[in-house]
Image (cartoon, coloured by chain):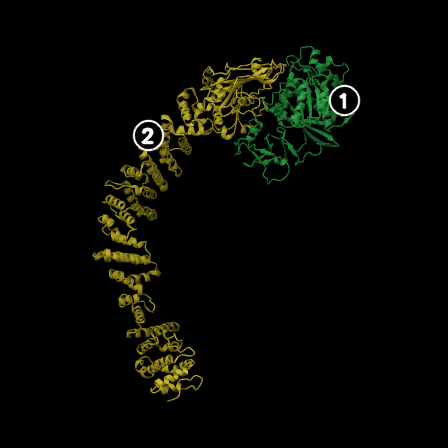
Amino acid sequence: MKGLGSFRNGSRRITCPLCFGSFAGREVLFRCQDPRCPQKAVPDLVYQERIGRTAPPGHVFGLPLSVKGDTPQGAPCDACRKETRKRLCPLCHFDLAHDAGLVDDRVIAIIGGRGTGKSHYIVALVNRLEHEVGRNFNFGIHMVGDPTRERFENDFRAPLFDRRTVLAKTQSAQVDMKVKTPLVFRLTIEVGGRQRALDLSFFDTAGEDLRALDIMSTEARYITSAAAIIFLLDPLQMKAVRSQLPNEGLPMHDPVADPTNIVERLREFFEAESIVSPTEKVQVPIAFTLAKMDALFPIIEAGSLLRRPSEHFGTFVDSESLSVHNEIRSYLEAWAGPGFPGRVDKGFARYRYFGVSSLGRPPSPDGRVEAVSSLRIEEPFLWILHELELIKGTR
Amino acid sequence: MPFYQHYYTSFVNPATREGGFRTMAESPGLDPAAETALKRLVAYRVPPSCDDRDLQGHPVALRYMTLGPDARVLLCARSSGTDENGRPGNFFCHSLVFRTGDLGSAAPVDFWRDPLWRMEGSPGITTLPVFPGLDPPGASPLDAVWQFLDSDPRRREWFLHLLAAVVESSSENRRIVILDAADDVACWVAALSRALPPSLVASLTFSTYDYDPYQAPYLITGTTRDSLFRFSPLEFQQYFLLDAEQGRISENKPGPYATFVAERFTLARYSDELQPFFDFCGRRLAGDAAISRRLDTLATLFGVLARDDWSIVTADEVAALRTALSWFEATPPQGDDDVADLTLVVGCLKTALAGMPVAAHVLDLRRALDLGRRYDPSFALGLHGDLEVVAGFLAAAHQTEATETLTILDEAYGAERVSEAMSESSYLAELAGRVRGDTDAISAAWGAIGGHLRWGPGPNPLLDETLSALEARAADPSQRDSAGRLLGVLASLRSLEWREGLLASAVAARAGAPSTQPLSWVYYALVHDLRPAGRSPLRSIVRPALPEVEIFEMEEDLNSADLASSLRIIREWLPLLHGRPLLEIAALSRVVRALFDRTPQSARRELALGVLREPDVAMCLDTETEAALVEVGFSRIRVHALTEDELKVFTRFLGHPSLDADTQGRMRVCIALAKGDLDRSSIGFLSRRLAALAPEEYRAEIDLLFGRLLPVDVHSNVYADVVLATYSVGHHAAFWEVHWRWFDELLGGDEHAHQAGRLGLGRARPNDKRIDISAAWLVDFLTFWFEEAPQRLSERPYLIQGFFLTLPEALKAAGQTPAWNDLMRRLEQQAGSARWYPVFASIAPRRGGTSRLPRR
């Protein structure tokens, strides 16, 4: 299985989770953290220029040529000789995870229009993976690094599960650099009696950053580096759906968030970034996922699979997923127009439709979330793991 | 002074129905680059622990930042509840973009909670007016600051450290994070803003609240406990952190600026003490808007300039003064206040240098004088003060620095003025007082300023001190070196006119003094490099005080002379002493004895003979000195051939009463050897002396005498004298061995042998002439022995017998000569008729034939 056998290989190339530059392990730089370092006052101009934010304190240095070997975990500062383990991308000076280059990693982009519920999807997915799905599939998942832990706790888990409120809007990466950094989760899977590890980097995107190609190219470049994409579609922005539901509780209509527009923009983005030619299909697995399914219960079939939890117990049941796919596809033909599935099919080679509900029910008008009872939320993720040959599947 | 407005929030554009975070409205003309930059500053997150709905409880973020070299942004971001979809996290940010300086005297933080800030916009309005200016903030910010600082006893101490952190932030690359209520953060910023010179307040960037201080670019960032900032122990070192909630603060060491300002940062002292300081800073910062450690320098500088006593300054203060010079060099003073600052700096530096002379500061003085000369109208009055710097260096015996300083003063004020000022009694008195008792310092003083001094009729306190010091040193043997060095310095001062001036002053100064020694030393130091005759003008100045100055001079001259030049010196002095016989004899004898006493034993004989060889000198010596020289000069003299000079002196002193008989005998022999003959008395002496020698010594000595006294053409009388003088019965065998060797060598040799004192029969085929000459010589030789010896040599018993007993053996050896037979034939031709010939023929050998010559 690709990606599960070669970790702890110091000579592998590392991809920066921020700038997506690729470099050899030996090329990493280090940031001295000793407050007494004589070079501490030298500003990190690379960081300021490439990332556009204030650099963390500390002198940046590289390994001398005399140091042999693979990806070093630490190095003595060339100014004060104090050992540091703070490793940086040599291209943008972004902090690398302590084990970058040692563990295989995959970028999974969670994208979608504004207000689609991307942040809610992430927190609900992680919660579900931690508590049920992991046990079923015999894999563990945990957060990697303090930035992920703190951000996930402060921005995702605590508001939803402790304070029981809807999550705050994700701010544009144009104003909040943090949005450009991934939430990194480590998946540990037992394969053939041996533990294997894989880091999954989730990028939560502000819907605002998908509203124009130029913004995508500066603030959401990770999409082009993604191993897979979970593309959340807000059915409540589809006119056909809105017309069938009572106005009360519906979000305001946002033409930019219309799924049709966003899917077309994504396709254009791959072309604009020269990932595919106009005649090629995008090869990255994409889970086109209808969010907020609970709000659609009044207008979907009573016996629909979408009303029931998924049944992937220890193996990805492809037939169930295909049933969902077909059902969603037919709904999309009705709601988004008959041309929508066709356009998807022409633009993307590996895709499937899903329907999920992150919260299980709409929040109260004042933003309270009484209980989180996610529905089918893990299914797109399991399909991606299956597509990436990380878990087994059955037909 | 345009103030461009900008609104940013999440809203639904009524025209497009598009929603989300974006620019809601802005003033026309807002620079797009500035807009892009300001967007990085607008992000606002409600602290996670806050109730989303309690908007009043959400911290307000007033932020101030630079957007470029000339653009500034002041913005107010605050929570605005939910977005159009009911999601929390929306905020409204009202920004003002303006040029540096457009806020006038107001500090950015003065606009905290100002009514100008809008909390919402109108979605349909996308264009905002450009403000031509801002209304001044309402209440006096300082009143709130005093109240804030005094309401918690810890805040004064925190303020000191925060201010220090602000000053050192650029050099330490250490940003400041304050965990406190946003209102209190604003108060901290207000206090710090009022603790800076107004021109720097524009550089104090801040945010009263930020959820992610790691990314915040401000110098000061306020935050909350539940923000992303961790406040870890390491971060307490990497950042400067004030956790006001828990009363924790990072460590730092407040520098001069923070200490100075914090101490005076009260309502009572602000106007009177800090305002003048800030004005001073404003003048000196002159366009430099960066907050840096330069403020520490300014505080140090202001502190020292404001002090009454500048005589003692710290190294930091000197550094600050030096830095101030650099500022004035880079930016000439503008206006009276600047000139006043400069005058203070220059004056302080000079006073400080006078009290703390350090070599490195000489350059500072040059810079200070250069600036003073250019900009200080009262500069010319500073010379006397500047000479204090010279005195300061000299008091520490730093001659080089003092000399360099004088050079600088010469350049600044003109050499004439400097000499004049230095020659004033008041300055010399002060200088004398500072170098008193320290010979090294006095030496340095003469070395540095001696050449500049002008001599007048008045007293010279430095000279008085010098003479006193010399007198004191003379009494202490351990101090003589330093006294010598001092005299050496005086000796290096060249001008004759100057020396005359000094000597006249010295004579006047020592009038009536019990000791004339110091005057003698000074005099000699000044004249020692002149020839004795050339010293007359200077000598005449001191003669009234030093009647026998010549003796002293001559002694001193000889003191430093080697043996060879001693005699030359004595010769030079003789003409100067003529006409003063008593002085002449006394002086010469004294100096010669002194010279003799300090000459090593091994060289004394040479010295004695050297002196005795000088008839002019010798005749001026007293009897005692002469006797001593004669005794040493001729003691244990070897018998040797004298040079012409030696012959004269030997002849002159032969018979001197201080010589014993033995020495006189040797002298006679030497004289005889030199003259080539022996007088009767010498023969007897020599015979007795040789007879008493050991065999080897005897053999060596008569070998010398034969060689020197018996050339080939020696007269038979001389031959007889030498034989008489050298023969000793006791050394019979040795005598004849030497004699016959002389005979053999005389006969031998080649055609050049004659010039070497030989006859030249040694070569294989000598010519007939040489054989004839040799035969004639042999005839004379044999005639002497057969005919004259019995009368001439009878007084030496067994001498003649010895000759004839050894003759056959000697002839036998000589018979080996290649031309022997020819020689014998010639001899027969020349002396065949002599009475002694048959006797000789009977014993003379023949080469290759019978052993006898044919009988006639």
Asked if labels 2 and 1 touch by Cβ distance under 8 angstroms, the answer is: no
Q: Which mark is residue B285?
A: none
Q: Helix, strand or loop at disc 2?
A: loop
For mark 1, name the chain: A
Camera-nearest residue between B695 and B161: B161
**Same chain letter for marks 1 and 2:** no
Near-viewer residue (B856 or B578): B856
Snapshot quadrant of residue B732: bottom left
For the point 36% across and 34% down, which residue is it? B370
Residue positioned most to the front: A279
Relative image position of residue B434 (x, y in whole percent): 32, 38
The percent position of residue B260, horizontal first and vertical second, equals: 43, 26
Q: Is residue B110 left or right of residue B718?
A: right
Q: CA distance from mark 1 to mark 2?
A: 97 Å
Instruction: Kindly tell me whether residue B127 is visible in this rendering.
Output: yes
Chain under numbered label 2? B
Q: Which residue is mark 2?
A: B377
The crowd level at tag 1 (other Cα within 10 Å; few <14, some 14-19, many 20+) is some
- Could you tell me if residue A99 is visible in this image? no
Residue B164, position in %: x, y? Answer: 48, 27
Q: Amino acid at mark 2?
A: Pro
In the rendered image, what is the letter of the chain coloured green?
A
Element under label 1?
helix
Chain B hue?
A: yellow
Per the image, the residue denoted by label 1 is A322
Q: Is residue B434 above or below residue B697?
A: above
State the image coordinates of residue B291 (x, y, percent, origin top left): 47, 27
Q: Amino acid at mark 1?
A: Leu
B630 or B422, which is in the foreground?
Answer: B422
Give the left or right position of residue B93, taking residue B749 as reference.
right
Q: Quarter-wise, where is residue B650 in the image?
A: bottom left
